[in-house]
Amino acid sequence: MITLYGTPKSRALRVSWLLEELGVDWQFSFLNFAKGDNRSDSFLAMNPSGKMPVITDGDMVVTESAAIMRYLAERYGNGAFLPEPGTESAAKHHQWVSFIITELEQPLWSMGKHRFALPEEQRLAEMLPVAKFEFDRAAAIAESWTPESGYILGDKVTIADILLAHTLMWATVFEQDLPPKLTAFRDRMQLRPALGSVLAKTQAIADAALAE
Ligand SMILES: N[C@@H](CCC(=O)N[C@@H](CS)C(=O)NCC(=O)O)C(=O)O
C-alpha cells in the first residue's frame, strides 16, 4: 500500500492528483504542521528536511515531488503519464519538468518563503517584486512553449502536465497574472475528474484530523 504524507493543497497535491489518475490503492496521512507532525522523529527519519510530500511504498521511502511522480508513473502507469524513454518526446517532457521545478516554481516559493514560510526575522519584503519579475519572465517562456489545446506533448497527459497545472494553480492562489495559453491550460486541466475527487478526499481526511 502506498502512503502519501502531506496536506491537501501543498506540493503533495501533485502527487495525490497523479495517484488518483493512476487509480492505484493509496492512503493519505495528513500532516498537522501546527502540531509539529513534520518535526516528529518518525517523519524526520523519512525526510530529514521535514518537508512534504513524502511517500512510502512498502519499505521504500521517496521524497521530492517530481521524483515521486516519476517513480509512480514508471511503476504503476503501464505506459501512461510518461513518454517512451530516449525519444524526442521524452527529452521535451524532462525539459518541461526541470523548467517547472527550477524556473517557474522557484519564484513562487520565494514569495511563499518571504511572505510566511521563513522565520519572521529572515523575511525580506524587497524579495517580493524580485520574485514577481522572475515569475513573469519564466511564465512568458512557458507560454511560448504551451500548445493552444490538448496537453504538453499532444493528446497524451503526462506528469509534466500535472506538475504545470499544479504550479499554475499555486500562482493563481498567489494572485499572479497568467498569460492566455497558460490560463486556458490551467482551466482545461482543472476539469479533470481526478483533481476534484482527490481534493475532496484529502480535505475530508484533513478536516477529520483537525476536528480531533
Ligand atoms: N523540492 C521539494 C520541496 C518540498 C517543500 O518545500 N514542501 C513544502 C510544502 S509545499 C514544505 O514541506 N514546507 C515545510 C518547510 O519548509 O518546513 C519537493 O518538490 O518536494
Image (cartoon, rainbow, N blue to C red):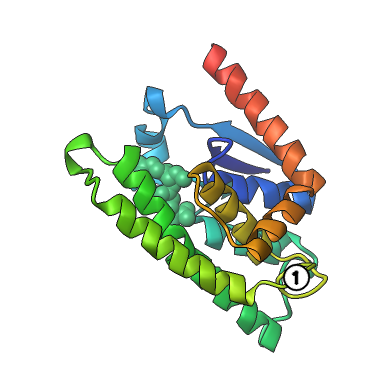
What x and y, as percent, mark residue 152? 70, 71
At x 78%, y 74%, the residue is 154
At x 60%, y 70%, the residue is 143
Crowd tier of the residue under label 1, counting other residues whose Cα lies within 10 Å: few below 14, some 14–19, many 20 or above: few
Q: Which element carries disc 1, helix, strand or loop? A: loop
Q: Quadrant of residue 123?
A: top left
The kind of residue tagged 1 is: Glu
Q: Quadrant of residue 144?
A: bottom right
Quadrant of the image for the N terminus? top right
Q: Nearer the viewer, residue 110 or 8?
A: 110
Q: How many marks?
A: 1
Q: Quadrant of residue 188?
A: bottom right
Q: Is the residue 26 above or below the residue 130 in the image?
A: above
Q: Is mark 1 within 8 Å of ligand 1?
A: no
What x and y, as percent, mark residue 181? 67, 65
Q: Is the residue 34 above or below the residue 164 in the image?
A: above
Quadrant of the image for the C terminus? top right
At x 65%, y 45%, the residue is 16
What x and y, as percent, mark residue 203? 64, 28
